[in-house]
Image: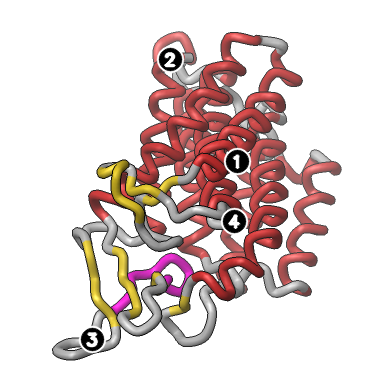
Amino acid sequence: MESTNPLRRPTPLLITTLLVLYSHLRHKLTLPAILLATFTSLLHSSTPSSLPFWSLILFFALGTIATRIGHAAKSHLTLSATGGSGAEGARNAAQVLANSGAASIFIILGLWGSSSSSSRTGWTAGKVDVGVAAAYAAAAADTLSSELGILARGQPLLITQPWRRVPRGTNGGVTLLGLAAGGVGGVALAGLHYAHYRDGGKAGLVSGLGLVGTVVDSLLGAVAQRTVEDKKSGRVVEGANGRRVMVGQGEGSRVGRGRDWLNNNGVNFTMTLAIGVVGLLLA
């Protein structure tokens, strides 16, 4: 897989510039996040195939729409660790890396592998594209599941104890609406892959891995991520920008449940990396 100078591709460069301006003017990303996102976009447009770049753009668009829809619900269903509602502000660099880092790793390894022989390394453009598409399908599925699943009328069920209902926003909590929304995210990325390659089998793989990704994310959240609740209101307290929520000592107002091995960004990165690797292996 040989690299292409991204500055010689006017369309990706123009779209990247417009999205940078949009993110800055609408306070969607912090400055470090904008810089990282710009590098990520240019990296994605440096591959022989245009699919990685458009997968990134589609994920960004889906995430932006879903976050806007779920914003109002989160404002009165969860709490923020910094005070006030659970609605989130500008995303930081760690969140950008959590969702796009796995795909960037695959692209870098693909470009590095092309310096020897693609027949020896196996890093062909088609194989890398499946890994990238699978990673973004999983990221999109998880984002839509999290942002839209909270709109479900009933309380979510804990994925590791499906007979137990938990407060909205609980790590590992799932709803049918959330799973359906996640499926839509996976299908969207799969549709993009099919439009590029006209390969129904690979597109089906991407779609399936997207849905698997949101299930894996829920399992990781239930097993490896602590959920913090406010004792008084019973609402889940969300950490700013995916960070851990601190629990006060003694008779504090918050109680933590579950293992504190990963924060939300760690869960997202681990999940997208795992799903992307599976996509690479099955491509």
Tell me the CA gap for discs 3 and 1.
35 Å
- Read off the residue under disc 3: 248
In front: mark 3 or mark 4?
4
Please state the horizontal and vertical placement of residue 68, each as a whole percent of the image.
Answer: 70, 62
Please state the horizontal and vertical placement of residue 247, each as a whole percent of the image.
Answer: 25, 80
Tell me the CA gap for discs 2 and 1.
25 Å
Is label 4 in a helix, a strand or a loop? loop
The earlier-in-sequence mark between 4 and 2 is 4
Tell me the CA gap for discs 4 and 2.
34 Å
Q: Residue 8, relative to residue 152: is it above or below?
A: above
- Read off the residue under disc 1: 181
Which numbered circle lies on residue 151? 4
Which numbered circle lies on residue 282? 2
Q: In this rendering, would 275 be left or right of 126?
A: left
In front: mark 4 or mark 1?
4
Residue 100 in view, yes or no: yes
Determine crowd level at label 3: few under 14, some 14-19, many 20+ residues with C-alpha closer than 10 A: few
Closest to the observer, 264 or 51: 264
Q: In this rendering, would 247 be left or right of 265?
A: left
Q: Residue at x 53, y 44 (%)?
A: 178
Q: Which residues are magenta?
A: 238-246
> In the rendered structure, are the residues bearing label 2 and label 3 in contact, judged by CB atoms less than 8 Å apart?
no
Tell me the CA gap for discs 4 and 1.
11 Å
